[in-house]
Amino acid sequence: MDLSDLIDRNATFTPDKAAIHFDGRTLSFADFHSRIADTARGLKTELGVGRGDRVAILAANHSDYLVLLYACARLGAMLVTLNWRLAVPEQLYILSDSGAKVLVVDREFSAVVAQLATALPDIKVVGLDFTPDRAMSFDDLVAAASGDGRNPHTDTSNPLLLVYTSGTTGRPKGAVLRQEALIWNAAMSHHLHDMRSDDHILTVLPMFHVGGLNIQTTPALQLGATVTVHNRFTPDAMLKTLAEDRPTLVLMVPAVMQAVLTHPQWDDTDVSSLRAVSTGSALVPVPLIEGFERRGLPVLQVYGSTETGPVSVYTRFGGDLARKTSTGLPGLYCEAKIVDDHGQEVPHGTAGEVVIRGPNVLYEYWGNAQATAEALRDGWYYTGDVGTRDDDGYFYIHDRKKNMIISGGENIYPAEVERVLHDHPCVAEAAVIGKADPKWQEVPVAYIVCHKDKSTDADELRGFVAAHLAKFKIPREFVFVDTLPRTALGKVQHFMLREQQ
């Protein structure tokens, strides 16, 4: 078996059931299965894609994004998901590093195609929603399908996803996830959400990231549930879908939660179909959680990374959600613990690095044995995140190790200060970084985004933090800005703030 067989089986059980709604069109599971099979045949016979070959996609969310994923699984090929927010030189680097044989690109991001002829002339281009010069469209590829759409020796042990991390320093690294990682990841998502085949998932986050792709979307399709895909997130479109199409589950990041909660139509939108809202981030401000709870919506938290599929630690539907600053318990099919710099587990309540072990974890970093050896030790993936675990086993993520501020010999975790700042009624967003200091080595500096029509000043915020945290944790400076730099999943890019110092 390979991963696409799960779609085949659902097409046998429920051929007429809606698998994907996208852009006013619906693919039944029978349609979805047929398009996957035809795409696999087209890739193999028209473009020569074989087992282990890399097929890249540069596109906003689209139903054929998911078709391509399962077609690659059918062939034993690998899908390289390109972040469309990157600059063209960054995308060209990933295409070169991955050795991509094919690039599927939508019209919106076709600027990269013009540079391929010079930089990477051997890559074959397919237009997702248009026909590029001297190339074919995705529909042409499907129409040309013939012959056998499988490759020998393809099974769930084959690598499937090659997803490049954002790379806070140096070049990004390509995390390799096997097909079986997506199966175990899905099983944990089913447990996390108490997901059922009659669920209806709304996908608004970008699928170039494992969060948008694998926290709800692929688990739902592999279970036989229905997914509505939005090309990209807009609060207007999301609220309209919630009211009219009645999805039961949705995944948001804090920035999306904030946009929805502050939308003028939020209070009047019927959200009664939702069983829960899920969110994935190291830091989810409590006021955002409480904003959804006031509408009767439980907020489920999930922690992980590109390298873990990403589902690894979570709170689950029907479980204990009282610890609003906790990301939950280790998932059903993986292990997690907190260790010191020597890899030894630390006592509960003591900060250390979060490590994960399980079948959902990456196989390797593409072509980077050194990075693989550093990240994978004795079967454990070292996340680079600092966290603690309480006496009941619940995890709390404090920050990235590289974000930790050392001031006068004391460790300051920016996320701890950020949590306090988010409780201030005027603060919409906050990010804390370290700034070099001749006396203390580093001192904390806070970047603040205020709510619309609200304002505060440094003295007020300094006093607010002082009432909750030790003196050495109080930011020495408060910088008021309009926006914070964020990743595709809404996490603040602290390294970019440090570069502005």
Image (tube, rainbow, N blue to C red):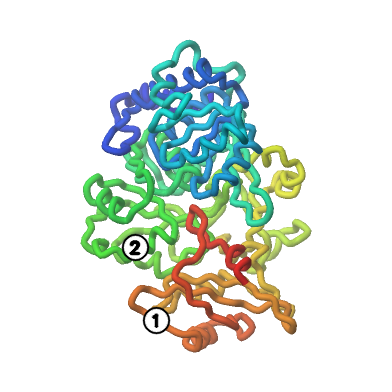
Image location of residue 159, percent across then percent down:
61, 32
User: Do the residues under discs 1 and 2 have CB atoms within 8 angstroms?
Assistant: no
Identified at 51% across, 23% down, the residue is 74
Whichever of labels 1 and 2 marks the residue nearer the N terminus, that label is 2
Q: In the drawing, does residue 310 fall left or right of residue 411?
A: left
Image location of residue 225, percent across then percent down:
36, 36
**Few, some or many residues within 10 Å of mark 2 (<14, 14–19, 20+):** some
**Few, some or many residues within 10 Å of mark 1 (<14, 14–19, 20+):** few
Residue 455 has which mark? 1
Q: Is residue 413 above or below residue 140?
A: below
Tell me the kind of residue under disc 2.
Phe
Image location of residue 108, percent across then percent down:
42, 41
Q: Is residue 167 above or below residue 38?
A: below
Tell me the kind of residue under disc 1.
Ser
Quickly name the residue at label 2.
292
Residue 75 has which mark? none
Identified at 74% across, 82% down, the residue is 438
